[in-house]
Amino acid sequence: MIDYSAAAGVARITLNRPEKRNAITGEMMSALRAALQRGNDDSTVRVLLIRGAGKDFCAGLDLNEVLKSAENEGAALASARQLGDLYIAMHRHPKPIISAVQGRALGGGAGIATASDLILATESAHFGYPEVKLGFIPAIVSTMLRRAVNERQAMELALTGEAIGAPRAYAIGLINRVFPDAEFEAGVERYVAALAESSATAMSLSKALLYQTDGVSFEASMEAGIQANVQARATDDFKRGVERFLKKS
């Protein structure tokens, strides 16, 4: 259900259940967590890329499992916590995680994309949090959604449950890049290849700093930046980068 491969600095993780539009089961969440850890442990990996097999990125949680867990409060809590812990693991992962979205990313599938650090999409892709239409709520994903877009945009997406196209998702700041469908594969490859050539330590420190300073005071954010600056100066990547620059000048 989860495929993993790594080459040229990129770990490629594929949600592979196309017959069910890659709907997420508990087993898939565990396998995805394992794939994320594998990418973390591999020192040759600098960037992780999450894709969906088939026409859609991910249709969300497997509703059969969700409905079954609803019959038992303990099972419901375990299922919800498993999803929340997956999003937390993505947030805390030291390496950049990119989701490349084609087709639909809905519910928990939109959550996986939103929990990623960067989102690339085809022009025909759609993003949505349709839980309200099932009498449910986008409870766990709301943490990331509220940080990605402004309050009124998040409110509209949560209350209407309507899916939005990639151009609008880009316009409201939900995603980073939109590629014409015919150019999507090549565009994704160029994008991740360029990131994979960047300093691993610099990217890791930048990711950690940006998330660390979310919602804190100006002074606390400034202090975090000072400490990260000192950390970055001590890295081998920084020293080598400066040496290359000085030789060119």
Image (cartoon, rainbow, N blue to C red):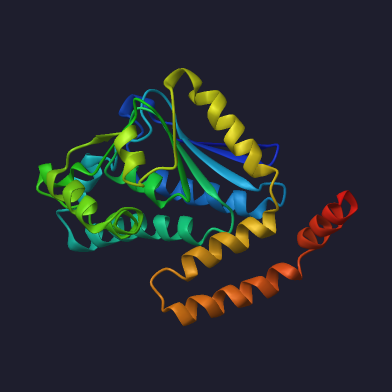
* 116, above or below 209, in the image: above
Which residue corresponds to the image point at 54% horizontal and 58% vertical from the top-left? 93
- Nearest to the observer: residue 137 or residue 5: 137
* 47, above or below 123, in the image: below
Q: Quadrant of residue 208?
A: bottom right
Which residue corresponds to the image point at 55% horizontal and 60% vertical from the top-left? 207
The answer to whether any part of residue 5 appears in the image is no
Residue 200 x %, y %: 68, 54
Residue 190 x %, y %: 61, 31
Q: Residue furthest right?
A: 247
**In the image, is 101 to the left or to the right of 66?**
right
**In the image, is 82 to the left or to the right of 47?**
left
Which residue corresponds to the image point at 41% horizontal and 48% vertical from the top-left? 29
**In the image, is 2 to the left or to the right of 66?**
right
* 153, above or below 51, in the image: below
| Quadrant of the snapshot with the N terminus | top left
* 192, above or below 116, in the image: above
Q: Residue furthest front?
A: 249
Residue 187 x %, y %: 54, 28
The answer to whether any part of residue 236 appears in the image is yes
Count all numbered tags in the image, as a single digit: 0
Residue 188 x %, y %: 54, 31
Q: Quadrant of residue 84?
A: bottom left
- Nearest to the observer: residue 45 or residue 127: 127
